[in-house]
Image (spheres, helix red, strand yellow):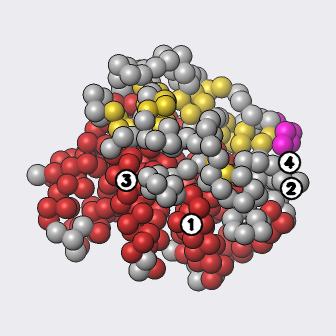
Amino acid sequence: MSLSELRAEYVWLRDWLFGQALPLWAGTGTDRPTGGFFEKLTPQGLPLDDPRRARVTARQIFSFATAGQLGWAGDAAGMVDYGLANLFRRHLPSEGIVIPTVAADGRVLRRDFDLYDHAFVLFALAAAARMRGGDPALAARAAALRAAMAPWTHPQRGFEEAVPRSLPLKANPHMHLFEAALAWEEVSDDPGWSALADSIAGLCLDRFLDSATGALKEHFDGDWLALPAPQDVVEPGHQFEWAWLLRRWGATRNRPEALAAAARLAEIGEGPGVDPAQDLAMNELNADLSVRDGLFRLWPQTERVKAHTSALAAAPDAVVQDRAAGLAARAARGLRRYFDHPVPGSWWEHLGRDGRPHDPEEPARASSLYHITCAIGELGQQLDRLKTA
């Protein structure tokens, strides 16, 4: 029964994505005169002319590429081409590192190294390369960008935030770099991507996880030691997201310790990380897993969907599979609540403790389309695998 419920949730989400969200963000959300993407839409569906970040262009490229894989009848290839043109024109010169932020007219607002933006640019290039059947030019540029990041390599593992050093070091950009490396593994035989994925997975297993609770920490000193309060936050959304990534990596490497860590992270996310009254993933916990921020952002709900959906593939029997499908269906129903918005295809970024929009004037962020599309893509992929198993 749970699996059929999950399939029904997938159909609803896919139909909403195809029929409402993608047309909105390919239309109103796209700034054709400048060749870029708007970062936010007001609750009335009007674009805001904020500065443009490389990470958002990259996320939109991924979203439209994934939509094409899912069967969207819109111009997925054209939107990916449009995004790549903007990426290379504004954020990714033919050589060197990513330019993180520009104004709408293309004036550079930031040139400093930003690991988070680099992770998403690499991720977008992988998605576009997959759509284009491996595109050697994109693969070469991605490999060159990976090499250009070498000056920011941490002496132990991972990357610095800046040179000269800026602290704290952060797990989050490494998570997305891990995601990018795994994406490139699927479209390229370049061994550098596997080496990068292995290094970040090892860093996570050795340093990011709290030995007492198994929870994923966020902030670290220069030697990758977790920081005390108030920087000891535990984010339920990232417990789910790392669970999803470690499960993928652990399965391909036959690493049971990674699979065990993934299971524990999902357990934390689903246990203390989910509010029982609203059945939604909360924003933040303390180090002891008590509630720090009990509001509900949109993106942790998408990561909850992904974590439980990915567990379907590893389920040893029908009972475990049914439980994972039930949890994923609950997460999907929670996600749908954010789409009850006056503008079809838009969403609320936050729900409050009462389950209603926390701030009715808060804009919808273009960056959230990546989270939504990734969750729906994971659902579709795993459900397809179960059909052919």
Magenta part of the chain = 105-112
Tell me which numbered mark, 3 or 2, is placed earlier along the sequence. 2
Disc 4 from disc 1: Cα separation: 32 Å
The answer to whether marks 3 and 4 mark residues whose Cβ atoms lie closer than 8 Å is no
Q: As displayed, is residue 122 above or below residue 114?
A: below
Q: Position of residue 21 (x, y in %)?
A: 44, 38
Q: Amino acid at mark 3?
A: Ala
Nearest the viewer among 97 and 195 is: 195
Residue highlighted by disc 4: 111
In this rendering, is residue 43 above or below 266? above
Mark 2 is on which residue type? Val
Question: Judging from the image, what secondary structure is the residue with disc 2 in?
Answer: loop
Q: Secondary structure at mark 1?
A: helix
Nearer the observer, 166 or 38: 166
**Label 1, on which residue?**
206
Q: Residue furthest top?
A: 360
- Give the foreground label among 3 and 1: 1
Tell me if residue 281 is in the magenta stretch. Answer: no
Number of the label disc, if any, that sits on residue 266: 3
